[in-house]
Amino acid sequence: MPFATISVIGLGYIGLPTAAVFASRKKQVIGVDVNQNAVDTINRGQIHIVEPDLDMVVHAAVTEGYLRATTQPEPADAFLIAVPTPFKGDHEPDLGYIESASKSIAPVLKKGDLVILESTSPVGATEQMAAWLADARPDLSFPQTHGEKSDIRIAHCPERVLPGHVLRELVQNDRVIGGMTPKCCESAINLYKIFVQGECIVTNARTAEMCKLTENSFRDVNIAFANELSMICDELDISVWELIRLANRHPRVNILQPGPGVGGHCIAVDPWFIVSKSPEQAHLIRTAREVNDSKPQWVINKVKLAVFEFLQTNPDKTIRDVTIACFGLAFKPDIDDLRESPALAITQQICETHPGPVLAIEPNISELPQELSGKLNLTSVETALSEADILLILVDHKEFKEIPSSTIQKHSFVDTRGIYAQR
């Protein structure tokens, strides 16, 4: 299969870079997204997300005629589904986006096509996707009923890239290929080898699904250890940053850095997919999630204490006079991604409960998300430092690291990232 035309469903933080990389290899790529603004932006050769160097790759791909975007799926030889997989209710996986994407491509499928689910998913999601496709296209055969002789090849290949390094890691990282049959795996490998320089490792769909969940759950457990340690050290009047630095001098110890919680579209969500499938066995994974989910409230309580202490030393002021500046809204440094961001959640709660002014500083966005619009001001570092009484450091953006410690020390501050404690 030469894969003359490739379609990517979902043009977000994973889908758009993937589409752009395929297009950079002189493949005809059709990107599909329900967001008309994203489609129009891409067709102008521009991007609607922040990712280093992606703007140049997209511009070149569109200009040269290898990439275009649309809101409706069109015929192709391979379809990659890269749509969100959030959770609903009591951390139950929401496969609604995958179902919608599957049903949208079903009418344009033809014999010999390959469909790959890239969205991080609970175990069994690829099989469920195949069932939705089969229901929509009874004239075609699928692996769950016809095995190697199926008309359509289906596989799961989870993304495993780091925001800020996506273009490099898409090419260099190994890929786990979970086909529903060996021929599905072979077809998927042929597709990814168009640009992947890393090894393509074959397994089945369920193991591939569980592999991505396991990777992120492992990281979540390790972050939970650091976050729990930070809360213990605070109670015992110990610098957690110094403690971790010392403990990590042990040749077999590598403790991560604590923070205000865990965010993003993977680590804050994926462990719950394991818990939802095996609630009686996933004790440690559930506890780690609970520790990390509790950290934002702990940070908020630290801010309340800082406000109380400020008022104690400034008796001429009331709580309505106290201005709090929240530094960072993204879920990690130097990106614009606010998904599941603890910094955003903390800022939102402070904004709703603090009677005085609240400022937000997020250099990677130009406007506030809807839930904060009209409730606080998005401002600059300089304005925040001149107007705020309490500084809350939530994300270690490079712009924040450039602020001299002497400037920060002039204020009452809560540093959840240890930027200034470690200098």
Image (cartoon, rainbow, N blue to C red):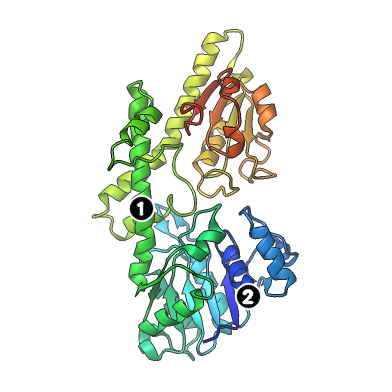
* SS for callout 2: strand
Q: Which residue is mark 2?
A: 29
Choose between 371 and 53: the one closer to the eye: 53
Q: For the point 73% across and 67% down, which residue is it?
A: 43
Question: Residue 46 placed where, x, y %?
Answer: 72, 60
* SS for callout 1: helix
Residue furthest left in the image: 281
- Badge count: 2
> Please, is residue 189 above or below residue 216 in the view?
below
Tag nearer the camera, 1 or 2: 2
Q: Amino acid at mark 1?
A: Ser
- Quadrant hosting residue 154: bottom left
Q: Amino acid at mark 2?
A: Val
**Mark 1 or mark 2, earlier in chain:** 2
Choose between 165 and 212: the one closer to the eye: 165
Q: Which residue is mark 1?
A: 217
Question: Residue 317 placed where, x, y %?
Answer: 61, 12
The alpha-carbon separation of the residues under discs 1 and 2 comes to 33 Å
> Please, is residue 211 above or below residue 180 in the view?
above
Question: Residue 202 placed where, x, y %?
Answer: 36, 74
